[in-house]
Image: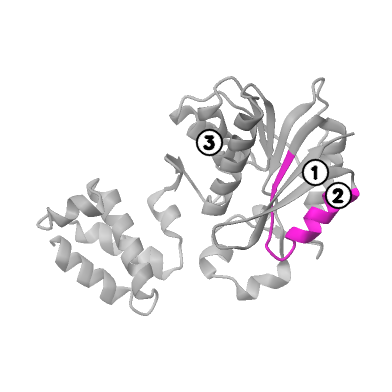
């Protein structure tokens, strides 16, 4: 089956599942994955043959609402192609914006050998992004799920970056550190269980619930724990960075202010309040 035939077939099979823009985006990802050719390359090489069995297998998974990232086994985070499984949250563009904000902040402060911890690391996207540019930085990254950590370790190995991954619980950080951190960063769970009904099945049926949802109807549950940790384990003039739910960003902002931090709220590319930077001054 050539490119044009495959595209028509894919669009017809997914017509009830995806809108035209989604079909275009996913088909491009599938073609790139199967052929190694970009959109531009394909314009000059539309005679390429595609495997119908493989394409049908992908379509079957899409019809089960499985995210394309889990079907293909990876997601891009900036220039990094990161392996993802159903044990890891799929990295989002908003998280990439957070990582860039951290990187810009540290470069502005000329602190490229910072001591950093990522709390709830998932695929390892944030520490890998930072360590690749900040070779002298010392970075720790934790997650509650050992299988998640194993994926993150492999991603770090793929880019030859040295990161110390370990298992722990955000709500019960029992490790004591002889040195305080320059940066604490987290994209913790913040979605209420009551919000599940309005969410895509691609998220609720496949992505790890422990990385998404709070179970006690308190969207700030994990933020409070991390702020408490930061008050004891952040250097003076150190930075605490959060990704937040757009509905609770101001609450996280105020939580940091109430705990003595100088705090800044930042919008994402979609003009939603999404990121918080808090500076330890005491």
Q: Is residue 117 in sight in this rendering?
A: yes
Q: Earlier in the sequence, mark 3 or mark 2?
A: 3
Identify the secondary structure beneath mark 1.
helix
- Where is residue 60, by image quadrant? bottom left
Quarter of the image for the C terminus: give it.
Answer: top right
Identify the secondary structure beneath mark 3.
helix
Q: Which residue is mark 3?
A: 129
- Residue 226's disc is 1
Answer whether labels 3 and 2 touch (C-beta < 8 Å).
no
Residue 137 located within the stretch drawn in magenta: no
Q: Residues within 10 Å of mark 2 (few under 14, many from 20)?
A: some
Q: Is residue 171 in sight in this rendering?
A: no
Q: Nearer the viewer, mark 1 or mark 3?
A: 3
In front of the other: 17 or 77 = 77
- Where is residue 31, by image quadrant? bottom left
Q: CA distance from mark 3 to mark 2?
A: 28 Å
At 19% across and 56% down in the image, what residue appears? 51
Across and down, in percent, residue 228 comes to 86, 42
Q: Earlier in the sequence, mark 1 or mark 2?
A: 1
* Above or below: residue 58 compared with residue 80: below
Across and down, in percent, residue 242 comes to 70, 47
Across and down, in percent, residue 193 comes to 72, 67
Which stretch did the figure color magenta? 240-258
Q: Which residue is mark 2?
A: 257
Residue 241 located within the stretch drawn in magenta: yes
At 21% across and 72% down in the image, what residue appears? 8
């Amino acid at each position: 089956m050539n490119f044009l035939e495959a595209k028509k077939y894919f669009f017809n099979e997914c017509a009830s599942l995806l809108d035209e823009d989604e079909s275009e985006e996913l088909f491009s990802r599938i073609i790139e994955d199967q052929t190694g050719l970009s959109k531009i390359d394909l314009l000059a090489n539309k005679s390429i043959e595609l495997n119908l069995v493989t394409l049908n297998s992908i379509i079957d998974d899409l019809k089960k609402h499985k995210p394309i990232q889990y079907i293909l086994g990876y997601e891009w985070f900036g220039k990094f192609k990161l392996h993802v499984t159903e044990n890891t949250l799929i990295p989002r563009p908003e998280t990439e914006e957070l990582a860039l904000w951290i990187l810009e902040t540290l470069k502005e402060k000329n602190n490229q050998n910072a001591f950093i911890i990522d709390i709830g690391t998932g695929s390892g996207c944030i520490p890998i992004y930072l360590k690749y540019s900040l070779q002298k930085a010392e970075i720790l990254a934790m997650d509650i799920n050992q299988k998640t950590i194993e994926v993150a370790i492999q991603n770090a190995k793929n880019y030859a970056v040295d990161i110390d991954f370990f298992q722990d619980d955000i709500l019960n950080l029992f490790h004591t550190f002889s040195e305080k951190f320059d940066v604490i960063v987290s994209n913790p769970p913040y979605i209420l269980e009551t919000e599940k009904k309005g969410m895509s099945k691609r998220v609720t049926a496949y992505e790890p619930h422990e990385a998404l949802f709070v179970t006690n109807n308190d969207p700030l549950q994990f933020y409070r724990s991390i702020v408490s940790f930061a008050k004891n384990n952040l250097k003076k003039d150190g930075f605490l960075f959060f990704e937040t739910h757009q509905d609770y960003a101001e609450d996280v902002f105020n939580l940091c202010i109430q705990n003595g931090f100088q705090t800044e709220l930042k919008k994402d590319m979609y003009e939603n309040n999404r990121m918080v930077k808090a500076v330890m001054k005491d």
